Amino acid sequence: MGTRSLTAALCLTLFSSGGAVYCYTRADALQVQGQWLMERGTAQAEDYALRLDGKAADAQLKTFAERRGVMEKAHLWERGMMLGILAAAMALVGAYVLFLLKRLDDQLLDAMGDLRPSSPPSVAPSEPTGALMSSLQR
């Protein structure tokens, strides 16, 4: 549990959030295009209402079908954005947990360094070393 895992988690966070931003820009561009197609379909509907021409109705249906395809793509990019945000949040939480574990490990090493004697303890020869010791003495 070193700084490599923490760095990897932070890189994953940055990568995921960058992917979410990219997906957002793509979805926003497609939404603007869908809005424009909706305006165009509305204008074609008004044209049909004035002239009662079948060509205007066919053009309107074609425009709405194109808008539907654009909006489906926009929703796919929005799903990607949500997954990127979720992955970034999870990686950020993981990085924080790894940071806390690293800090705890460092504190434990510092505490163990204070408790270690300078020389190893010697075994006194007067202690019995029999095989039938009770479990409390082991």
Image (cartoon, rainbow, N blue to C red):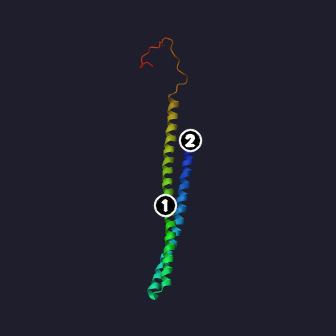
Left or right relative to 137: residue 19: right
Q: Residues within 10 Å of mark 1 (few under 14, many from 20)?
A: some
Give percent across and percent down for residue 18. Answer: 55, 58
Q: Earlier in the sequence, mark 2 or mark 1?
A: 2
Give percent across and percent down for residue 67. Answer: 50, 73
In front of the other: 52 or 21: 52
In front of the other: 77 or 59: 59
Give percent across and percent down for residue 37. Answer: 50, 75
Which circle marks residue 105 in the picture? none
Q: Secondary structure at mark 1?
A: helix
Relative height, residue 16 to residue 114 (above, below): below
Q: In the picture, which quadrant includes the C terminus? A: top left
> What is the CA distance from the residue labelled 2 to the residue labelled 1?
34 Å
What residue sits 51% from the left and 69% below the top?
69
Q: Mark 2 belongs to which amino acid?
A: Gly
Which circle marks residue 79 in the picture? 1
Q: Mark 1 belongs to which amino acid?
A: Arg
Residue found farthest to the top: 126
Residue named by callout 2 = 2
What residue sits 54% from the left and 22% below the top?
120
What residue sits 56% from the left and 41% below the top?
2
Q: Secondary structure at mark 2?
A: loop
